[in-house]
């Protein structure tokens, strides 16, 4: 067990942005909210999956919505807590701990906020091992978890329980329609599970990992060393490309931000060109018609000057960035998982070719 | 208390179509389903609002959706029952009787189907006294009923509980989004209430009234007399216009069918022209720029040959019809009710001018 302290927040926020692979919303806003909570005396204790008691009752918590919306409609920070409370009321049981639904981007912070507010521990791990755009991509559901009940809540006093669904994709579709009606983002509580079920299905250690990534990045930045190298050393990732953004196509459709980013190489990659397709998150890196890296592996852009992760909603012409590939956790690359988060699940007729893992210093559970 | 027999169904279906004021879906399809239920031995008992015990627990039931969808996507007939069961499970109490949400159109039949299936009585009355397009227009809510919880269910095993909403309009918006996602129509259970609350807020006697209207129409048709006159004599309504449909504009927007119908007069109305605006249901009759009749009063088209009620989704060029105005029940014309169902609630800067009631033979509670 460890405690999240105020000085950890900047590091977690940077690491979560890198794990967001271009999506997951703006961790900075969530960080400000959580910092206020900590300053008001609330505390956040982190337990490892091993420390969960088998008979504990848990939910996965976070927010749902196209990340672009989180810039336009600032969340109040209470939607996730309302969603957890709504689901607790529906099932007639209080939760013993909260599991982050998604570690990438803003949702790294929302689970911590829920833990602080409800005075329960947060599990070190999450249901995506990164950010993903849809709910059936949550490992808690992939690995046998029941997709119902789930709860959505907004900041206006509305709360909806999805009491029963045919399957996880139905959960996604219905929850998405409600989220759009709630203004484009909503608090979400889902995947009711026991401690034992959580242990079996969570992507472990990802909260610690975001902190490690962020710390390494902050140290590198202070020492004027390469942030990219620091991120790679912690994650076992590789630099895939260095280039300048020369084209961005982006549209908001069905509650998602969908499009692509074109980069033109410089330094080692001078003369080459790559394209990254995204749906909220970066999905696939194309080079000369070849899918070099794809989901579920992580594709993240880090600016070459400050090492800032670049999000799909803020990326624009002229940004100079390293394209970094990070191998996903093995739990995302099983045959079961690939049906939900492999390239075919996003409509690409492409085989998933795992990105090789380079030397890693951080331990992952 | 009376029992709905198979021979009542045709009459109720015709009366419900007239009370649907152009909307409310196709009562014929619901009738076929209910007839199968009755033939299989299920029974439907009708209780008057006076017969409700104060401490009974009731819900309003029906289906939600643009009526045009009910022609394209045939409902399975179980969605409403699933919705009632979902809400019963959520509140942890079984209902003692079901109140029709809406008597106009298909929803006259859905409440009867629920009653048959769950072996509980149906109340003689409804929450609209006609058909209306939106949920905040239900009298159970207007007169102090709580707009939550409510349940929606489809035929694919999905069920959603709207656990808490800010107000009835939020219920409408959220339920509409879910209904659209469920394929355009869904079973709905709403307005949990006691017997005493139901008595205070229901539009009473409307189920009997549909049967009276239908019987009168059937008798007139058999005797080759005017169906229009028969409907007027039972409802206290007036013939407003006789004409031929010369233009229809209709579009499906936000889950509603919206548009207008233009008629060119013949017989007494030769040379004149009127327009009827609709949103699922006929809303307002314009003649020479003047709003002759408007919501909440009922505007119904009856063909001049067979006396068939004409719906907004099937109306087409060339149909010759009597435009009939029927005074609404007084419970729809109070100051409270007009805020939800008067012309201004539909965006018209028009005062509601009650249609005078002519001599009536049917008793209304």
Image (spheres, coloured by chain):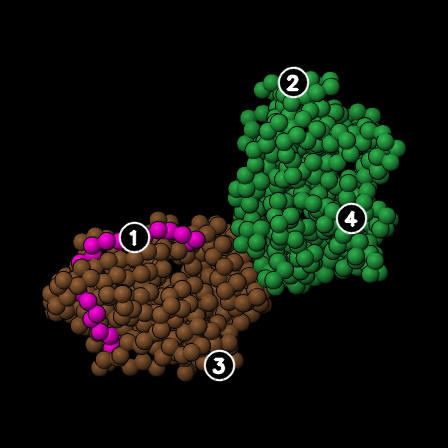
Chain colours: A brown, B green
Q: CA distance from mark 3 to mark 4?
A: 49 Å
The residue labelled by disc 4 is B123
Asked if residue A45 shows in the view, the reply is no
Mark 3 and mark 1 lie on one chain; the one further toward the N terminus is: 3
The residue labelled by disc 3 is A196
The residue labelled by disc 2 is B272
Q: Is residue A66 left or right of residue B299?
A: left
Q: CA distance from mark 4 to mark 2?
A: 43 Å
The verdict on a common chain for dots 3 and 4 is no
Q: Is residue A297 left or right of residue A179?
A: left
Towards the viewer: A229 or A297: A297
Looking at the rendered image, the disc whose residue lies closer to the viewer, 4 or 1, is 1
Q: In which chain is the residue bearing label 1?
A: A
Q: Who's the residue at 52% across and 63% down the image?
A: A170
Q: Is residue B272 left or right of residue B117?
A: left
Q: In which chain is the residue bearing label 3?
A: A
């Amino acid at each position: 067990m460890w405690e999240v302290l105020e000085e950890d927040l900047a590091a977690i926020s940077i690491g979560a942005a890198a794990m967001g692979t271009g999506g997951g919303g703006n961790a900075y806003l969530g960080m400000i909210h959580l910092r206020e909570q900590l300053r008001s005396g609330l505390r956040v204790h982190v337990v490892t999956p091993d420390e969960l008691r088998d008979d504990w009752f848990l939910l996965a918590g976070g927010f749902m919505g196209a990340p672009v919306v989180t810039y336009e409609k600032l969340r109040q920070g209470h939607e996730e807590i309302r969603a957890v409370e709504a689901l607790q009321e529906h099932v007639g049981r209080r939760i013993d701990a909260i599991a982050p639904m998604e570690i990438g981007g803003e949702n790294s912070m929302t689970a911590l906020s829920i833990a602080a507010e409800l005075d329960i521990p947060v599990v070190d791990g999450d249901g995506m091992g990164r950010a993903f755009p849809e709910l059936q991509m949550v490992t808690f559901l992939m690995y046998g978890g029941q997709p119902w009940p789930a709860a959505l809540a907004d900041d206006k006093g509305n709360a909806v329980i999805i009491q029963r669904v045919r399957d996880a994709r139905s959960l996604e579709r219905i929850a998405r329609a409600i989220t759009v009606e709630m203004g484009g983002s909503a608090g979400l509580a889902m995947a009711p599970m026991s401690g034992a079920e959580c242990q079996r299905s969570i992507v472990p250690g990802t909260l610690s990992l975001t902190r490690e990534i962020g710390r390494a990045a902050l140290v590198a930045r202070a020492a004027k060393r390469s942030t990219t190298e620091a991120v790679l050393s912690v994650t076992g990732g590789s630099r895939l490309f260095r280039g300048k953004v020369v084209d961005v196509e982006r549209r908001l459709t069905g509650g998602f931000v969908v499009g692509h980013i074109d980069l033109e190489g410089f330094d080692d990659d001078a003369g080459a060109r790559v394209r990254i397709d995204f749906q909220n998150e970066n999905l696939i890196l194309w080079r000369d018609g070849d899918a070099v890296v794809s989901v579920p592996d992580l594709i993240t852009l880090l600016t070459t000057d400050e090492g800032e992760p670049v999000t799909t909603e803020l990326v624009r012409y002229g940004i100079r960035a390293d394209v970094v590939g990070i191998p996903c956790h093995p739990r995302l690359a099983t045959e079961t998982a690939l049906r939900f988060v492999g390239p075919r699940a996003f409509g690409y007729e492409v085989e998933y070719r795992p990105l090789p893992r380079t030397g890693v210093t951080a331990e992952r559970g």
